[in-house]
Amino acid sequence: MNVDRLPATRVRLLDPYGQAMIPVPYRVVHRHEETADTVTVRLEPVGDGLDAWAPGQFTMVYAFGVGEIPISISGGSGPVIQHTVRAVGAVSRAICDAPVGSILGLRGPFGRGWPDRPPEGDVIVLAGGIGLAPLRPVILAGLREPGRLSVLIGARTPADLIFTAEYDQWRAAGARVLVTVDRADATWTGHVGVVTTLLSQVPVAPSGTTRPAPTGYICGPEIMMRLGADALVAAGVPPHRIWVSLERTMHCGIALCGHCQLGPILVCRDGPVVDAGNAARLLQHREL
Ligand SMILES: Cc1cc2nc3c(=O)[nH]c(=O)nc-3n(C[C@H](O)[C@H](O)[C@H](O)COP(=O)(O)OP(=O)(O)OC[C@H]3O[C@@H](n4cnc5c(N)ncnc54)[C@H](O)[C@@H]3O)c2cc1C
């Protein structure tokens, strides 16, 4: 059989490992500078695109000639995939610098994303810095049921906040959106303090009441996720209903190379999203 003549999706099904290692070309159709070091790129497949993605999944993004890194999907619909990337090194810088019209390679979507929110109970999203990117699809899905969703956003400074143009839209759609920064500047009139301090403004059903328990989704620096999970538990959210997204160096994305091993799991396959109880155990293992 000549696999070159088959659509990409069928080829991937016939040879899941081989094809999953081949980047699929996507064109940058839009780029938006969120902050001085963070860019959101919208990508459209040149031919057949990747399979459908779920919130919390990631792709391996290849900047040709530079390298490939895991990046969460921050949005998109149909064949379009959106990534929000902070430039911290060579590859992330090359993706941020990719001009409209240029081509990036995508593999995926990979990993276990955020579980669907339960049919009842409030949803609390806790995001730190670039951690808001993988949570954006959860927020957009949550807006379909106004009144259940609280979004707590923290960043180091006002200049580090991403998706700022959307906060008022989320509020208008019925979400409680609270924002804080670690360090204010002269323009900032909002809350100052770590993101967990915003939790006092969110009514959480105390355990033992008849109100359904809330569900928490957290993404940010590791220490923030640990403290965030503790704060949610203290506020009455059961640990098995708190989800965090782990970040570990990874290369293959398909559980072959072992780079992202964390104790008994491979983060690319068994994560990146795990529940808070598992995360607390797993994060005792040092990164390889
Ligand atoms: C599942 C998953 C999803 C991810 N999603 C996103 C995303 O949506 N957006 C995004 O911007 N990043 C995301 N990352 C992180 C991203 O993969 C790394 O920033 C990237 O691998 C860095 O590669 P590089 O070659 O640019 O820099 P490297 O040369 O690998 O690193 C340059 C320097 O930056 C440090 N560094 C690396 N990563 C980080 C980091 N995250 N924060 C601070 N310092 C760092 C390194 O220690 C090194 O000192 C994700 C990671 C994982 C595992």
Image: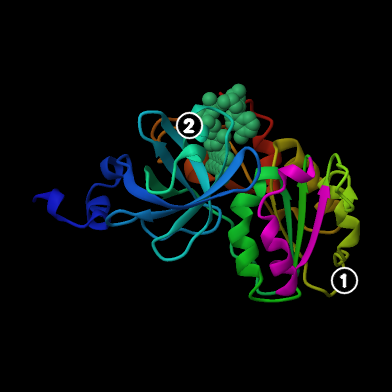
42 horizontally vs 14: left or right: right
145 horizontally vs 111: left or right: right
- Give the mark toward the camera: 1 or 2: 2
Mark number, residue 91: 2
The CA span between labels 1 and 2 is 49 Å
Task: Residue 283: name its quadrant.
Answer: top right
The verdict on label 2 being within 8 Å of ligand 1 is yes
Q: Quadrant of the C terminus?
A: top right
Is residue 91 covered in magenta? Answer: no
Magenta segment range?
157-180
Report the residue at 69% width, 68% height from top: 169
**Closer to us: 285 or 90:** 90
Give the image quadrant in which the ligand numbered 1 is located.
top right
Marks 1 and 2: CB-CB under 8 Å?
no
Residue at disc 1, secondary structure: loop
Q: Residues within 10 Å of mark 2 (few under 14, many from 20)?
A: some
Mark number, residue 209: 1
Picture coordinates of residue 57, whole percent (x, y) = 51, 51
Report the residue at 22% width, 52% height from top: 11
The mark tally for this picture is 2
193 horizontally vs 5: left or right: right
